[in-house]
Image (cartoon, rainbow, N blue to C red):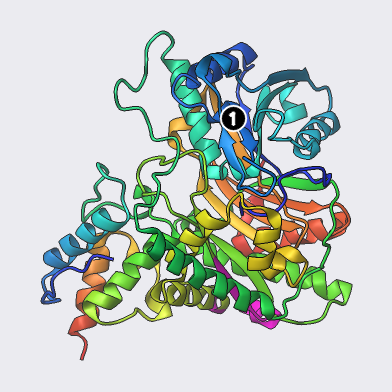
Amino acid sequence: MALGSTGQGDGASNNALLVVHCDGPLAPERVTRSLERLLDFCPWPAARLRRPFPWGKLHWAAGRRTALAPPPVGWRAVATPEAFHQAVDAELNTAIDPRREPPLRFLILDGAPDTVGAPSVLVMTWFHPLMDPRGAQNLLRHLSVLDDHVGDSPWGTAVPAFAPTPDARPLRERGRLARKSVEYMRSVSRMPSGAPRAGRNGPVRFRQESFIDRDPAVSHDRATREIWWRLAVVGKALREVWARRGLPDVPVLLPIAVDLRPKGEPGPTFGNMLAFHFARFQPSDTADTTRLANALRNQMADAVRQGQIEANEVAMTFLQYRPLPMIRRAVRWISGGDTFSFNCADVTEFPAALARCFGRRVVNAYHVPAVPPRPGIGVFFNRCAGRNNLVVAWIDGVLSEDDVNRIVEIVREEMGWLGTP
Amino acid sequence: MAKGPSLPATDHDTVAQTLAAFVNANIMARGRRIQPDDDFEMMGIDSMALLKVLLFVEAEFGFWPPDEDLVTENLRSPRVLAHYICRRRSVP
Protein backbone atom coordinates (compact mmCIF):
# COMPACT_ATOMS: atom_id res chain seq x y z
CA MET A 1 0.00 0.00 0.00
CA ALA A 2 1.50 3.31 -0.96
CA LEU A 3 0.78 4.87 2.39
CA GLY A 4 2.74 5.57 5.53
CA SER A 5 6.38 6.26 6.05
CA THR A 6 8.36 8.02 3.38
CA GLY A 7 11.61 6.90 4.90
CA GLN A 8 12.26 10.30 6.39
CA GLY A 9 14.42 9.55 9.35
CA ASP A 10 12.28 6.92 11.06
CA GLY A 11 14.88 4.23 10.35
CA ALA A 12 12.39 1.96 8.58
CA SER A 13 13.07 0.48 5.19
CA ASN A 14 10.29 0.80 2.63
CA ASN A 15 12.17 -1.29 0.12
CA ALA A 16 10.63 -3.90 -2.13
CA LEU A 17 12.64 -6.38 -4.21
CA LEU A 18 12.37 -8.29 -7.46
CA VAL A 19 14.93 -11.10 -7.56
CA VAL A 20 15.64 -12.65 -10.98
CA HIS A 21 17.79 -15.77 -11.37
CA CYS A 22 19.47 -16.12 -14.78
CA ASP A 23 21.30 -18.98 -16.48
CA GLY A 24 24.49 -17.04 -17.20
CA PRO A 25 26.50 -14.02 -16.06
CA LEU A 26 24.75 -10.68 -16.39
CA ALA A 27 26.72 -7.64 -17.54
CA PRO A 28 26.16 -4.56 -15.31
CA GLU A 29 27.00 -2.25 -18.22
CA ARG A 30 24.06 -3.63 -20.23
CA VAL A 31 21.67 -2.82 -17.40
CA THR A 32 23.15 0.67 -17.02
CA ARG A 33 22.92 1.27 -20.77
CA SER A 34 19.25 0.30 -20.82
CA LEU A 35 18.52 2.55 -17.84
CA GLU A 36 20.32 5.43 -19.53
CA ARG A 37 18.25 4.92 -22.69
CA LEU A 38 15.01 4.58 -20.73
CA LEU A 39 15.57 8.07 -19.34
CA ASP A 40 15.17 9.40 -22.89
CA PHE A 41 11.55 8.24 -22.71
CA CYS A 42 10.73 8.30 -19.01
CA PRO A 43 12.36 10.32 -16.18
CA TRP A 44 10.89 8.50 -13.18
CA PRO A 45 13.78 6.07 -12.49
CA ALA A 46 15.87 9.18 -11.79
CA ALA A 47 13.19 11.16 -9.92
CA ARG A 48 13.24 12.45 -6.35
CA LEU A 49 10.38 12.69 -3.89
CA ARG A 50 9.70 16.37 -3.26
CA ARG A 51 7.37 18.51 -1.19
CA PRO A 52 6.74 22.05 -2.45
CA PHE A 53 6.60 23.37 1.11
CA PRO A 54 6.77 21.66 4.54
CA TRP A 55 3.04 20.93 4.71
CA GLY A 56 2.62 20.28 0.99
CA LYS A 57 1.84 17.10 -0.90
CA LEU A 58 4.72 14.79 -1.72
CA HIS A 59 5.26 14.22 -5.42
CA TRP A 60 7.86 12.81 -7.79
CA ALA A 61 10.01 15.41 -9.52
CA ALA A 62 12.59 15.00 -12.24
CA GLY A 63 14.76 17.66 -13.85
CA ARG A 64 15.71 18.08 -17.49
CA ARG A 65 17.04 15.04 -19.35
CA THR A 66 20.61 16.36 -19.27
CA ALA A 67 20.45 16.49 -15.46
CA LEU A 68 19.16 12.92 -15.05
CA ALA A 69 21.53 10.14 -14.03
CA PRO A 70 20.55 6.46 -14.17
CA PRO A 71 20.10 4.55 -10.92
CA PRO A 72 23.16 2.67 -9.65
CA VAL A 73 23.94 -0.87 -10.84
CA GLY A 74 26.26 -2.78 -8.52
CA TRP A 75 28.00 -6.13 -8.90
CA ARG A 76 29.29 -8.54 -6.32
CA ALA A 77 30.60 -12.11 -6.23
CA VAL A 78 29.18 -14.33 -3.51
CA ALA A 79 30.89 -17.51 -2.38
CA THR A 80 28.31 -19.17 -0.14
CA PRO A 81 24.51 -19.42 0.11
CA GLU A 82 24.75 -17.46 3.37
CA ALA A 83 26.65 -14.66 1.65
CA PHE A 84 24.00 -14.59 -1.06
CA HIS A 85 21.19 -14.33 1.45
CA GLN A 86 23.06 -11.65 3.42
CA ALA A 87 23.56 -9.61 0.25
CA VAL A 88 19.83 -9.77 -0.63
CA ASP A 89 18.97 -9.07 3.01
CA ALA A 90 21.14 -5.95 2.91
CA GLU A 91 19.33 -4.76 -0.20
CA LEU A 92 16.03 -5.19 1.59
CA ASN A 93 17.13 -3.31 4.69
CA THR A 94 19.39 -0.57 3.35
CA ALA A 95 16.69 2.08 3.13
CA ILE A 96 16.40 4.22 0.03
CA ASP A 97 15.92 7.89 0.82
CA PRO A 98 13.93 9.00 -2.24
CA ARG A 99 14.48 12.68 -1.41
CA ARG A 100 18.22 12.38 -1.88
CA GLU A 101 18.87 9.39 -4.14
CA PRO A 102 17.21 7.58 -7.03
CA PRO A 103 14.14 5.62 -5.96
CA LEU A 104 15.59 2.33 -7.22
CA ARG A 105 18.88 0.51 -7.58
CA PHE A 106 20.19 -2.73 -9.06
CA LEU A 107 22.64 -5.33 -7.82
CA ILE A 108 24.03 -8.30 -9.73
CA LEU A 109 25.18 -11.23 -7.62
CA ASP A 110 27.39 -13.82 -9.29
CA GLY A 111 28.30 -17.18 -7.87
CA ALA A 112 28.21 -20.90 -8.52
CA PRO A 113 24.69 -22.25 -9.21
CA ASP A 114 24.70 -24.19 -5.95
CA THR A 115 25.49 -20.92 -4.15
CA VAL A 116 22.87 -18.54 -5.49
CA GLY A 117 20.55 -20.97 -7.29
CA ALA A 118 21.76 -19.77 -10.72
CA PRO A 119 25.00 -18.41 -12.19
CA SER A 120 23.79 -14.82 -11.87
CA VAL A 121 21.03 -13.04 -9.97
CA LEU A 122 19.66 -9.58 -10.68
CA VAL A 123 18.20 -7.84 -7.62
CA MET A 124 16.05 -4.78 -8.33
CA THR A 125 15.35 -2.76 -5.18
CA TRP A 126 12.95 0.17 -5.07
CA PHE A 127 11.23 2.54 -2.66
CA HIS A 128 7.90 0.76 -2.70
CA PRO A 129 5.51 3.70 -3.37
CA LEU A 130 7.33 4.18 -6.69
CA MET A 131 5.61 1.15 -8.20
CA ASP A 132 3.93 -2.14 -7.33
CA PRO A 133 5.36 -5.61 -8.10
CA ARG A 134 3.78 -5.76 -11.55
CA GLY A 135 5.14 -2.29 -12.21
CA ALA A 136 8.60 -3.64 -11.37
CA GLN A 137 8.09 -6.47 -13.86
CA ASN A 138 7.04 -3.89 -16.45
CA LEU A 139 10.17 -1.83 -15.78
CA LEU A 140 12.38 -4.87 -16.25
CA ARG A 141 10.51 -5.69 -19.44
CA HIS A 142 11.08 -2.18 -20.82
CA LEU A 143 14.77 -2.37 -19.93
CA SER A 144 15.05 -5.77 -21.57
CA VAL A 145 13.36 -4.50 -24.75
CA LEU A 146 15.80 -1.59 -24.88
CA ASP A 147 18.68 -4.04 -24.41
CA ASP A 148 17.39 -6.10 -27.36
CA HIS A 149 17.20 -3.02 -29.61
CA VAL A 150 20.57 -1.40 -29.28
CA GLY A 151 20.85 1.61 -31.54
CA ASP A 152 17.20 2.04 -32.48
CA SER A 153 14.00 2.97 -30.70
CA PRO A 154 12.12 -0.23 -29.99
CA TRP A 155 8.76 1.47 -29.72
CA GLY A 156 8.81 3.82 -32.70
CA THR A 157 6.08 6.38 -32.14
CA ALA A 158 4.08 4.03 -29.86
CA VAL A 159 6.02 4.70 -26.65
CA PRO A 160 4.44 2.86 -23.69
CA ALA A 161 2.46 4.81 -21.10
CA PHE A 162 4.80 4.54 -18.13
CA ALA A 163 2.44 6.20 -15.64
CA PRO A 164 -1.35 5.93 -15.23
CA THR A 165 -3.62 8.32 -17.06
CA PRO A 166 -5.11 10.84 -14.60
CA ASP A 167 -8.74 10.25 -13.68
CA ALA A 168 -10.81 12.50 -15.94
CA ARG A 169 -13.87 12.60 -13.66
CA PRO A 170 -14.70 15.94 -12.04
CA LEU A 171 -13.09 16.67 -8.66
CA ARG A 172 -16.53 16.77 -7.03
CA GLU A 173 -17.29 13.21 -8.18
CA ARG A 174 -13.86 11.91 -7.17
CA GLY A 175 -14.18 13.61 -3.80
CA ARG A 176 -17.51 11.92 -3.19
CA LEU A 177 -16.06 8.51 -4.01
CA ALA A 178 -12.96 9.09 -1.88
CA ARG A 179 -15.07 10.11 1.13
CA LYS A 180 -17.15 6.97 0.71
CA SER A 181 -13.99 4.83 0.78
CA VAL A 182 -12.45 6.65 3.74
CA GLU A 183 -15.67 6.20 5.71
CA TYR A 184 -15.58 2.50 4.87
CA MET A 185 -11.91 2.22 5.92
CA ARG A 186 -12.70 4.00 9.20
CA SER A 187 -15.55 1.59 9.87
CA VAL A 188 -13.27 -1.37 9.19
CA SER A 189 -10.52 -0.05 11.44
CA ARG A 190 -12.93 0.42 14.36
CA MET A 191 -13.53 -3.32 14.62
CA PRO A 192 -11.02 -5.35 16.64
CA SER A 193 -8.79 -7.73 14.71
CA GLY A 194 -6.25 -10.38 15.57
CA ALA A 195 -2.59 -9.65 14.94
CA PRO A 196 0.76 -9.94 16.69
CA ARG A 197 0.63 -6.14 17.04
CA ALA A 198 4.30 -5.69 16.40
CA GLY A 199 4.00 -2.01 15.58
CA ARG A 200 7.73 -1.59 15.64
CA ASN A 201 10.39 -0.83 13.12
CA GLY A 202 13.24 -3.21 12.62
CA PRO A 203 15.05 -5.23 9.99
CA VAL A 204 12.88 -7.14 7.56
CA ARG A 205 13.60 -10.86 7.26
CA PHE A 206 12.43 -13.11 4.47
CA ARG A 207 12.38 -16.74 3.39
CA GLN A 208 11.90 -17.83 -0.21
CA GLU A 209 11.05 -21.39 -1.21
CA SER A 210 10.23 -22.89 -4.61
CA PHE A 211 7.90 -25.83 -5.16
CA ILE A 212 6.48 -27.88 -7.99
CA ASP A 213 2.95 -29.25 -8.22
CA ARG A 214 2.56 -32.72 -6.72
CA ASP A 215 -0.28 -33.60 -9.06
CA PRO A 216 -0.34 -31.98 -12.52
CA ALA A 217 -4.12 -32.56 -12.68
CA VAL A 218 -4.57 -30.43 -9.58
CA SER A 219 -2.35 -27.75 -11.07
CA HIS A 220 -4.87 -27.47 -13.92
CA ASP A 221 -7.64 -26.74 -11.42
CA ARG A 222 -8.02 -23.01 -11.32
CA ALA A 223 -9.54 -23.02 -7.84
CA THR A 224 -6.23 -23.32 -5.98
CA ARG A 225 -4.74 -20.49 -8.03
CA GLU A 226 -7.51 -18.09 -7.07
CA ILE A 227 -6.46 -15.48 -4.54
CA TRP A 228 -9.34 -16.49 -2.23
CA TRP A 229 -7.93 -19.99 -1.87
CA ARG A 230 -4.44 -18.72 -1.12
CA LEU A 231 -5.70 -16.23 1.44
CA ALA A 232 -7.59 -19.03 3.17
CA VAL A 233 -4.50 -21.25 3.21
CA VAL A 234 -2.28 -18.49 4.60
CA GLY A 235 -4.95 -17.69 7.17
CA LYS A 236 -4.88 -21.30 8.27
CA ALA A 237 -1.09 -21.25 8.64
CA LEU A 238 -1.08 -18.02 10.64
CA ARG A 239 -3.92 -19.20 12.83
CA GLU A 240 -1.70 -22.05 13.99
CA VAL A 241 1.20 -19.68 14.70
CA TRP A 242 -1.02 -17.36 16.72
CA ALA A 243 -2.63 -20.24 18.59
CA ARG A 244 0.82 -21.41 19.65
CA ARG A 245 1.47 -17.90 20.96
CA GLY A 246 -1.75 -17.90 22.92
CA LEU A 247 -3.07 -14.88 21.03
CA PRO A 248 -6.81 -14.24 21.43
CA ASP A 249 -9.15 -15.92 18.95
CA VAL A 250 -10.52 -12.69 17.47
CA PRO A 251 -11.47 -11.95 13.83
CA VAL A 252 -8.80 -11.58 11.18
CA LEU A 253 -8.63 -8.47 8.97
CA LEU A 254 -6.53 -8.29 5.84
CA PRO A 255 -6.20 -6.09 2.75
CA ILE A 256 -6.65 -7.65 -0.69
CA ALA A 257 -4.95 -5.75 -3.51
CA VAL A 258 -6.87 -5.39 -6.75
CA ASP A 259 -4.70 -4.74 -9.81
CA LEU A 260 -6.47 -2.12 -11.92
CA ARG A 261 -4.44 -2.63 -15.09
CA PRO A 262 -6.35 -3.74 -18.19
CA LYS A 263 -5.55 -7.37 -18.98
CA GLY A 264 -3.53 -8.57 -21.94
CA GLU A 265 -0.81 -5.94 -21.91
CA PRO A 266 1.66 -4.74 -19.26
CA GLY A 267 -0.07 -1.45 -18.41
CA PRO A 268 1.55 1.41 -16.49
CA THR A 269 4.85 0.95 -14.67
CA PHE A 270 5.13 3.79 -12.15
CA GLY A 271 2.54 5.04 -9.66
CA ASN A 272 -0.28 3.29 -7.89
CA MET A 273 -2.33 0.80 -9.87
CA LEU A 274 -3.84 -0.95 -6.88
CA ALA A 275 -7.12 -0.60 -5.03
CA PHE A 276 -7.86 -2.44 -1.81
CA HIS A 277 -10.63 -4.52 -0.35
CA PHE A 278 -10.59 -5.40 3.34
CA ALA A 279 -11.58 -8.97 4.10
CA ARG A 280 -12.55 -10.37 7.46
CA PHE A 281 -12.98 -13.89 8.81
CA GLN A 282 -12.91 -15.84 12.04
CA PRO A 283 -9.82 -17.94 12.76
CA SER A 284 -12.10 -20.96 13.21
CA ASP A 285 -13.23 -20.50 9.58
CA THR A 286 -9.81 -21.71 8.41
CA ALA A 287 -10.76 -25.29 9.34
CA ASP A 288 -12.55 -25.57 5.96
CA THR A 289 -10.38 -24.04 3.24
CA THR A 290 -12.93 -24.41 0.44
CA ARG A 291 -15.70 -22.84 2.47
CA LEU A 292 -13.50 -19.95 3.60
CA ALA A 293 -12.26 -19.33 0.04
CA ASN A 294 -15.89 -19.14 -1.13
CA ALA A 295 -16.76 -16.76 1.70
CA LEU A 296 -13.84 -14.46 0.81
CA ARG A 297 -14.93 -14.43 -2.84
CA ASN A 298 -18.48 -13.56 -1.81
CA GLN A 299 -17.21 -10.71 0.41
CA MET A 300 -15.29 -9.31 -2.54
CA ALA A 301 -18.36 -9.64 -4.79
CA ASP A 302 -20.35 -7.62 -2.24
CA ALA A 303 -17.61 -4.97 -2.16
CA VAL A 304 -17.77 -4.63 -5.95
CA ARG A 305 -21.59 -4.48 -5.91
CA GLN A 306 -21.44 -1.69 -3.32
CA GLY A 307 -18.87 0.26 -5.34
CA GLN A 308 -16.20 0.00 -2.64
CA ILE A 309 -13.40 -1.06 -4.99
CA GLU A 310 -14.05 1.85 -7.35
CA ALA A 311 -14.25 4.24 -4.38
CA ASN A 312 -11.00 2.92 -2.90
CA GLU A 313 -9.26 3.35 -6.26
CA VAL A 314 -10.13 7.06 -6.12
CA ALA A 315 -9.29 7.37 -2.42
CA MET A 316 -5.81 6.00 -3.07
CA THR A 317 -5.11 8.82 -5.53
CA PHE A 318 -6.00 11.33 -2.80
CA LEU A 319 -4.11 9.63 0.02
CA GLN A 320 -0.96 8.72 -1.83
CA TYR A 321 1.97 10.90 -0.80
CA ARG A 322 -0.16 13.11 1.47
CA PRO A 323 1.53 14.29 4.65
CA LEU A 324 1.39 11.53 7.23
CA PRO A 325 -0.75 13.50 9.76
CA MET A 326 -3.42 13.90 7.10
CA ILE A 327 -3.41 10.16 6.38
CA ARG A 328 -3.53 9.44 10.10
CA ARG A 329 -6.64 11.53 10.47
CA ALA A 330 -8.24 9.70 7.57
CA VAL A 331 -7.34 6.14 8.42
CA ARG A 332 -7.05 5.07 12.02
CA TRP A 333 -4.81 2.02 11.58
CA ILE A 334 -2.01 4.20 10.25
CA SER A 335 -1.93 6.07 13.56
CA GLY A 336 -1.41 2.98 15.69
CA GLY A 337 -4.94 1.78 16.11
CA ASP A 338 -6.13 -1.63 15.11
CA THR A 339 -4.23 -3.07 12.25
CA PHE A 340 -4.31 -5.72 9.57
CA SER A 341 -3.67 -9.26 10.66
CA PHE A 342 -1.32 -10.04 7.77
CA ASN A 343 -0.53 -9.12 4.19
CA CYS A 344 -0.93 -11.61 1.37
CA ALA A 345 -0.76 -11.27 -2.41
CA ASP A 346 -0.27 -13.34 -5.55
CA VAL A 347 1.68 -11.68 -8.35
CA THR A 348 0.70 -14.71 -10.53
CA GLU A 349 2.78 -15.76 -13.55
CA PHE A 350 6.10 -14.04 -14.29
CA PRO A 351 5.66 -12.49 -17.77
CA ALA A 352 6.50 -14.75 -20.72
CA ALA A 353 8.07 -11.67 -22.33
CA LEU A 354 10.76 -11.86 -19.63
CA ALA A 355 11.73 -15.46 -20.38
CA ARG A 356 15.03 -13.89 -21.45
CA CYS A 357 16.54 -10.84 -19.81
CA PHE A 358 19.75 -9.03 -20.76
CA GLY A 359 20.72 -11.93 -22.98
CA ARG A 360 20.18 -14.62 -20.37
CA ARG A 361 17.39 -17.12 -19.78
CA VAL A 362 15.38 -16.46 -16.63
CA VAL A 363 15.28 -19.66 -14.55
CA ASN A 364 13.31 -18.20 -11.64
CA ALA A 365 12.06 -14.86 -10.33
CA TYR A 366 10.22 -13.79 -7.20
CA HIS A 367 9.18 -10.71 -5.26
CA VAL A 368 9.91 -9.61 -1.71
CA PRO A 369 7.32 -6.83 -1.18
CA ALA A 370 7.59 -4.19 1.54
CA VAL A 371 6.27 -5.30 4.93
CA PRO A 372 4.77 -2.49 7.03
CA PRO A 373 5.47 -2.55 10.80
CA ARG A 374 1.81 -3.36 11.36
CA PRO A 375 1.19 -6.25 11.02
CA GLY A 376 4.81 -7.06 10.20
CA ILE A 377 3.96 -10.30 8.34
CA GLY A 378 3.53 -10.84 4.62
CA VAL A 379 3.11 -14.02 2.59
CA PHE A 380 3.46 -13.72 -1.16
CA PHE A 381 3.05 -16.03 -4.14
CA ASN A 382 4.15 -16.02 -7.75
CA ARG A 383 5.01 -18.53 -10.46
CA CYS A 384 7.97 -18.61 -12.81
CA ALA A 385 9.34 -21.26 -15.18
CA GLY A 386 7.11 -23.97 -13.74
CA ARG A 387 7.98 -23.16 -10.13
CA ASN A 388 5.57 -22.03 -7.43
CA ASN A 389 7.39 -19.45 -5.34
CA LEU A 390 6.45 -18.71 -1.76
CA VAL A 391 7.99 -15.76 0.08
CA VAL A 392 7.41 -15.13 3.77
CA ALA A 393 8.61 -11.70 4.93
CA TRP A 394 8.44 -10.38 8.47
CA ILE A 395 9.74 -7.69 10.76
CA ASP A 396 12.48 -9.11 12.94
CA GLY A 397 10.96 -10.47 16.14
CA VAL A 398 7.42 -10.90 14.84
CA LEU A 399 8.02 -14.50 13.73
CA SER A 400 10.55 -17.09 14.82
CA GLU A 401 12.34 -19.39 12.38
CA ASP A 402 10.14 -22.19 13.71
CA ASP A 403 7.01 -20.10 12.95
CA VAL A 404 8.23 -19.58 9.39
CA ASN A 405 8.94 -23.28 8.98
CA ARG A 406 5.36 -24.07 9.98
CA ILE A 407 3.88 -21.43 7.68
CA VAL A 408 5.86 -22.77 4.72
CA GLU A 409 4.97 -26.36 5.55
CA ILE A 410 1.24 -25.69 5.98
CA VAL A 411 1.04 -23.70 2.75
CA ARG A 412 3.04 -26.36 0.87
CA GLU A 413 0.77 -29.13 2.12
CA GLU A 414 -2.49 -27.25 1.48
CA MET A 415 -1.38 -26.26 -2.01
CA GLY A 416 -0.32 -29.81 -2.88
CA TRP A 417 3.26 -28.84 -3.65
CA LEU A 418 6.52 -30.76 -3.56
CA GLY A 419 9.99 -29.35 -2.93
CA THR A 420 12.03 -28.66 -6.09
CA PRO A 421 14.66 -31.30 -6.90
CA MET B 1 -20.09 -2.03 -16.02
CA ALA B 2 -21.51 -2.14 -19.53
CA LYS B 3 -24.70 -4.09 -19.85
CA GLY B 4 -25.54 -6.07 -22.95
CA PRO B 5 -28.93 -6.91 -24.36
CA SER B 6 -31.15 -9.51 -22.71
CA LEU B 7 -30.79 -12.75 -24.63
CA PRO B 8 -32.52 -16.09 -24.85
CA ALA B 9 -30.22 -18.23 -22.75
CA THR B 10 -30.54 -21.25 -25.02
CA ASP B 11 -28.44 -19.61 -27.71
CA HIS B 12 -24.98 -20.74 -26.57
CA ASP B 13 -23.14 -18.89 -29.26
CA THR B 14 -24.89 -15.59 -28.62
CA VAL B 15 -24.25 -15.90 -24.89
CA ALA B 16 -20.57 -16.67 -25.53
CA GLN B 17 -20.30 -13.65 -27.81
CA THR B 18 -22.01 -11.48 -25.19
CA LEU B 19 -19.59 -12.63 -22.49
CA ALA B 20 -16.58 -12.03 -24.74
CA ALA B 21 -17.90 -8.57 -25.63
CA PHE B 22 -18.27 -7.71 -21.95
CA VAL B 23 -14.73 -8.86 -21.18
CA ASN B 24 -13.32 -6.92 -24.12
CA ALA B 25 -15.17 -3.74 -23.16
CA ASN B 26 -14.50 -3.84 -19.41
CA ILE B 27 -11.47 -5.99 -18.62
CA MET B 28 -9.10 -6.41 -21.55
CA ALA B 29 -6.68 -3.78 -22.80
CA ARG B 30 -7.59 -2.03 -26.00
CA GLY B 31 -6.21 -4.02 -28.90
CA ARG B 32 -6.15 -7.30 -26.94
CA ARG B 33 -9.45 -8.99 -27.63
CA ILE B 34 -10.63 -12.23 -26.15
CA GLN B 35 -12.50 -14.69 -28.38
CA PRO B 36 -15.28 -17.02 -27.15
CA ASP B 37 -12.97 -20.05 -27.16
CA ASP B 38 -9.97 -18.37 -25.51
CA ASP B 39 -8.94 -19.65 -22.10
CA PHE B 40 -9.72 -16.94 -19.53
CA GLU B 41 -6.60 -17.63 -17.49
CA MET B 42 -4.30 -17.71 -20.52
CA MET B 43 -5.67 -14.28 -21.46
CA GLY B 44 -4.71 -12.88 -18.06
CA ILE B 45 -8.13 -12.98 -16.42
CA ASP B 46 -7.21 -13.10 -12.74
CA SER B 47 -9.43 -13.75 -9.71
CA MET B 48 -10.78 -10.21 -9.59
CA ALA B 49 -11.45 -10.05 -13.32
CA LEU B 50 -13.29 -13.35 -13.21
CA LEU B 51 -15.37 -11.98 -10.36
CA LYS B 52 -16.39 -9.09 -12.61
CA VAL B 53 -17.49 -11.61 -15.23
CA LEU B 54 -19.62 -13.42 -12.63
CA LEU B 55 -21.19 -10.13 -11.55
CA PHE B 56 -22.00 -9.48 -15.20
CA VAL B 57 -23.64 -12.92 -15.39
CA GLU B 58 -25.67 -11.98 -12.32
CA ALA B 59 -26.80 -8.67 -13.84
CA GLU B 60 -27.41 -10.01 -17.32
CA PHE B 61 -28.79 -13.51 -16.72
CA GLY B 62 -30.27 -13.05 -13.30
CA PHE B 63 -28.39 -15.48 -11.08
CA TRP B 64 -25.18 -15.84 -9.11
CA PRO B 65 -23.68 -19.30 -9.59
CA PRO B 66 -23.64 -21.39 -6.42
CA ASP B 67 -20.20 -22.02 -4.93
CA GLU B 68 -20.10 -25.64 -6.07
CA ASP B 69 -20.51 -24.54 -9.70
CA LEU B 70 -17.56 -22.13 -9.61
CA VAL B 71 -15.08 -24.69 -10.90
CA THR B 72 -12.73 -24.76 -13.86
CA GLU B 73 -15.11 -27.02 -15.81
CA ASN B 74 -17.64 -24.16 -15.91
CA LEU B 75 -15.29 -21.19 -16.11
CA ARG B 76 -12.55 -22.06 -18.57
CA SER B 77 -13.63 -19.76 -21.43
CA PRO B 78 -16.55 -17.55 -22.50
CA ARG B 79 -18.01 -20.47 -24.46
CA VAL B 80 -17.70 -22.93 -21.59
CA LEU B 81 -19.30 -20.40 -19.25
CA ALA B 82 -22.03 -19.81 -21.85
CA HIS B 83 -22.82 -23.52 -21.89
CA TYR B 84 -23.06 -23.48 -18.11
CA ILE B 85 -25.38 -20.46 -18.17
CA CYS B 86 -27.63 -22.08 -20.75
CA ARG B 87 -27.76 -25.35 -18.83
CA ARG B 88 -28.54 -23.49 -15.65
CA ARG B 89 -31.24 -21.38 -17.29
CA SER B 90 -32.88 -24.41 -18.84
CA VAL B 91 -33.30 -26.08 -15.43
CA PRO B 92 -36.72 -25.12 -14.00
Which quadrant of the view contains residue A67? top right
Q: Residues within 10 Å of mark 1 (few under 14, many from 20)?
A: many
Q: Tell me the quarter of the image containing the N terminus of chain A.
A: bottom right
The number of callouts visible is 1
Position of residue A345 in the picture relative to residue B67 (left or right)? right
User: Which residue is at the front of the view, B46 or A219?
Assistant: B46
Q: Is residue A352 left or right of residue A45?
A: left
- Eyeballing the image, is A86 above or below A261? above
Quarter holding residue A279:
bottom right
Mark 1 secondary-structure assignment: loop
Q: Residue furthest bottom?
A: B92
Using the image as rendered, state which of residue A400 and residue A386 is in the foreground.
A400
Q: Chain of mark 1?
A: A
Q: Residue at x 52, y 43 (%)?
A: A271
For disc 1, the marked residue is A47
Left or right of residue A109: residue A381: left
| Residue A101, position as x, y percentages in the image | 70, 28
| x and y percentages locating residue A60 in the rendered image | 57, 37
User: Magenta stretch containing residue A287, yes or no?
Assistant: yes
Question: Where does the image place residue A42, in percent across and percent down from the top left?
Answer: 47, 27
| Residue B4 visible in the picture | yes
Q: Give me the residue at 65% from left, 60% from top.
A: A327
A121 and B31: which one is in front? B31
Q: Quadrant of the C terminus of chain A?
A: top right
Stretch of the chain drawn in magenta:
A277-291
Residue drawn at 50 percent across, 64 percent down:
A312
Let me know if residue A4 is in the magenta part.
no
Q: Amino acid at mark 1?
A: Ala
Give the percent coordinates (x, y) of residue A394: 78, 53
Q: Is residue A385 visible?
A: no
Residue A40 vs A256, above or below: the answer is: above
Look at 81% across and 53% down and name the residue there. Answer: A395
